[in-house]
Amino acid sequence: MPLRSSNVPMIFSQQRRQSPLKAEWRIFFLIMLACAAVLGLMNGLGQPDRFIYDALIKSAQRPANEQIVIIAIDNPSIAALGRWPWKRTVHAELINRLNQSKAKAIGIDIIFSEPEVQSDGDTRLTHAIASNQRVVLPLLIEHTAQGLQPTLPIPSLMDAAHNVGHTHFVFDADGLVRSILLNETLGDASWPQFSVAVYQTGMRKTPSDRMRVGHDNRELIPFAGPPGHAIKVSYIDVLRGKIPPGYFDGKYVLIGATASGIATMFPTPLTTKERLMPGVEINANVLAGLLEKRGIQPATKWLNALVTMSFTCLALFACLYLSPFKALGATLVLIGLIALTNYTLFMLELWVPPAAAILMVISIYPLWNWRRLEATLFYLSEELERLHYNNAMVLRDKSSAVIAQDADFLERQIAAIRIAGDRARDVHQFVSDSLNNMPDATLVLSQAGELLMCNLKAQLQLAQMGVDYQKPLTLKEIFSHFQAPPRSPIHDQIWYNTLLQTPTCETMEVETRDKSGREFLIKSTASRMADGAMLGWIISLIDVTSLRAAERRREESLNFISHDLRVPQSSILALIQLQKNPSTAFAADEFLNRVEKSVEATLHLAESFVHLAKAESSGYQLQESDFSSMLAEAADSMWAFAHARSVTVEIDTPAEDAWLTVDRSLMIRALGNLLSNAIKFSPEGGRVRCEAQSLMTAEGPAIACSIHDQGPGIAVSKQSMIFSPFLRADDHGQDGIGLGLAFVKMVVERHGGTITLDSTVGKGSTFTIMLPCVADDEEDQVSMNHQEGSKP
């Protein structure tokens, strides 16, 4: 078997020194993680994040909410009613017209902070608002010499209104409006945002129900579309009756200015420099979000830091464990994953600025690969030089080990690698010669855990486990086909690593199983040169399956004989001793009943043991039998037991005969054991169902029989032991020694079938056996012979 090269690092060498790259990695990891935390706590990188947010808002446009109507103070209304501001009698007339409708709420986005001097407009408007009882008025919060001060509607209007709300929008650093404060608090006074107040009014909430969530309750506005997207009607059309009052039934009405020159216009993510959005339409978008349960919450800085650090960690570990090419692909995938995560969270109404995470992921790849390249060149030079001056195990020509010091860097590296290759080939030949005389399946591994060679027995063993021994293999790839030892002394390492940690003069022995259940004794010993230099490890694989099975059978038999059979006999002796003493003697009938019960238990134990031994033997008397008749016979044998427990046994078999080649008596007893268990564990008055059906499998025709009980069920943790001899799941107070199901499994498998268990605690158990049937042409012949044999 030729020597192979491998990429497996020398993780097991006792002389291995700590790679400087590991220490540098830890420092790099901490620096990058700290940078990610700082950028995340900044809660966004400003304009890049705002650009991404605006793109998402534009992609999430939707139809205008039909429950919201804006009565716009537009240019035609100004032209018809004169210059602004209008008399309040005009507004009173509009409100009176709206009073004829059943609008849910009316929001007047017009500031009435000063009384009207030469008119009864205030009185009429107050009366109109009071008559409606669903009107919301705005207030301003202005900067004054005394600080922030509210500008409220005049007292009469404020008293008549159902609620008031602030019209303050939050401007970002680029001057765009993207968010609002749901609640504004000044001292002891608190006001909801204007649209929130309209929403509360429409929901029939009183002003006392205002949200007192604090000044920092910022929420991003879920814009539905660009300016002009909301449903609007002209103020003058409503005033002149062109819009019937019924049009506003069940709707939220916002009254505000959209005309150029009087409307307060704002830039938003969906506006352009030429076309801004009036405040009343922004309020309409906020109200639509409330009605549609849309509210984009900005992530807290701690959540943003956590997300940024998470993606940073993924990028760091990708660069650590993947090759540069794969790490580049992983970096691109992570960027896509950040974008997908950001879009998903945005659709879930949570805004997490992604720019910081993208910046960190993009930065890590070039920075770490630069450091890795530097460390690789340094480490390779150092290791080759150290290898050159170490004592060689096999050295064909000492002159070949001389490297010209005046050669350039590349030539020195090539020479060092050539010498190392010669030494490796010498080692290979040495181990190969030693391996030819090994009596067991033997593997020779390098210090790094690489498979260097193996003998023919080992090649056969690896092939049986599905391992391609002709390709480069490592310790992990070989022993991944084995289970961990049940009592491994090493808990903080992979168990098979202990095979390469053998002390100097000792042999390491580990007993375990492969995935097919075969048991192996694995021995590992160090292979050394004459001068004591370490060469590698020699590992032997010894199949002890038959040996351990024989030991277990002997131990089980001894335990059975020494304990289970002795218990009832001991009980009889104890009864006899008690009966001899008149003061402790039982009545004659009770004494005989107790002795009889112990004798029957002894006979039952002996009979179960004999049946299991017979099932394990090779002397089966095969004959063609119909499965339905065997199942019926087994059920008949259980009739008395079922009747005593008031359990109903239902049998459902296929209409056509299903012929099998079986030992009829053993198969009937196996079916009887399953029925006995089902009856025993079912409650009194319960029901046991036997369902058989013919199947066509890849191997040919088969019969599947399922026996369902209504017992307590078997826990998943106990199901693996249910078919083992002398082992039982929780028996719920029932008698038995655990041989019945072991007998059933042995009989079914010896007939080429399978048995499975489907059980849920509290819902009963279902045992299903599947047996191969006689092929169709053979079945016809068997049926004919059966009919001829039944003729007189």
Image: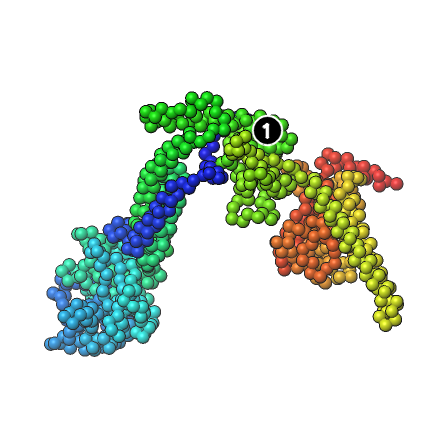
Residue 540 found in image quarter: top right
| 600 lies left or right of 96 | right
| 522 lies left or right of 48 | right
Q: Is residue 221 above or below residue 544?
A: below
From this viewpoint, is residue 693 visible?
A: no
Residue at which label 1 appears: 435
Please, which colouring scheme is shown? rainbow
Check the image and name the residue furthest to the front.
531
Q: Residue at x 77, y 39 (%)?
A: 618
Q: Residues within 10 Å of mark 1 (few under 14, many from 20)?
A: some
Q: Secondary structure at mark 1?
A: helix
Q: Residue at x 78, y 47 (%)?
A: 611
Q: Residue at x 33, y 48 (%)?
A: 32
Residue 446, position in %: x, y?
A: 51, 33
Residue 360, position in %: x, y?
A: 32, 47
Q: Is residue 382 above or below residue 75?
A: above
Residue 437, position in %: x, y?
A: 62, 27
Q: Nearer the viewer, residue 66 or 658?
A: 658
| 186 lies left or right of 788 | left
Q: Which amino acid, mark 1? A: Leu
Residue 103 found in image quarter: bottom left
Q: Residue at x 38, y 44 (%)?
A: 23
